Image (cartoon, rainbow, N blue to C red):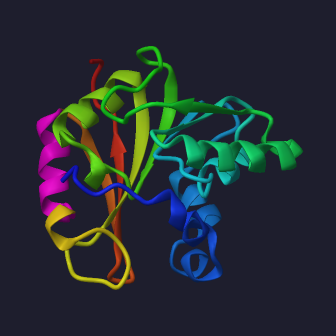
Amino acid sequence: MGGHRFNPEKAHKLDNPERRKHMPPERILQEFQIHPSDVVLDLGAGTGYFTLPASWMTEKEVYALDLEPRMLALLQEKVRQTEAAANVHVLQGAIENIPLESQSVDKIIASLVLHESDDLKKTLREMQRVLRPGGRILIIEWEKQQTEEGPPLSERIAVEEMEETIRNVGMEIERRVRENGMYYLLHVKQSHVV
């Protein structure tokens, strides 16, 4: 984990019809149940694949966090072009050190980013810190098997390992979904105050 970072030169791959077919953001977020009163954090937001649809589902803030300034510049341009996304706030930073106050968000989206973490347990604890009691996390990660797309197999996190680490930091797994052999989705609940 932690060695591979997504190359911003490939940003066009993040929002293409093939990806939308395999991972439709609107359907996934509907199942995650973002409500109009939810403050949302999108970790590794990239060009806004989940950020923008989330911003249309809530009346509150949607924080889009990414380490890469070029990705955030692309996202800011999309936000400027989409008046309905006025509630999006772009943040530059690492997922291991989220620049938000404790207990400030209701929902966290972590899509295909946790395998990039230098310390998965620390990152999950940081997610716990910013999440309000009873808040929820949507984790989407690559299955630990070889595919044409995605990070090297050695950097992928098996679903069993992810679930064990989530439980070890004191959170509860509500639901596991396997998507077409490429991804798994975990719906996680904050089970206590950190």
Disc tally is 0
Whether residue 111 is visible, yes or no, is: yes
Q: Which residues are the magenta region?
A: 156-169
Residue nearer the viewer, 190 or 122: 122
Give the residue at x 26% y 72%. Answer: 143
Does the segment drawn in magenta span residue 131? Answer: no
Q: Is residue 34 above or below residue 152?
A: above
Q: Farthest front residue? A: 9
Could you tell whether 79 is left or right of 107 in the image? right
Could you tell whether 160 is left or right of 59 in the image? left
The C terminus - image quarter: top left
Q: Is residue 99 above or below residue 40?
A: above
Residue nearer the viewer, 130 or 66: 66
At which x and y percent is residue 109?
47, 46
Whether residue 34 is visible, yes or no, is: no
At which x and y percent is residue 64?
57, 38
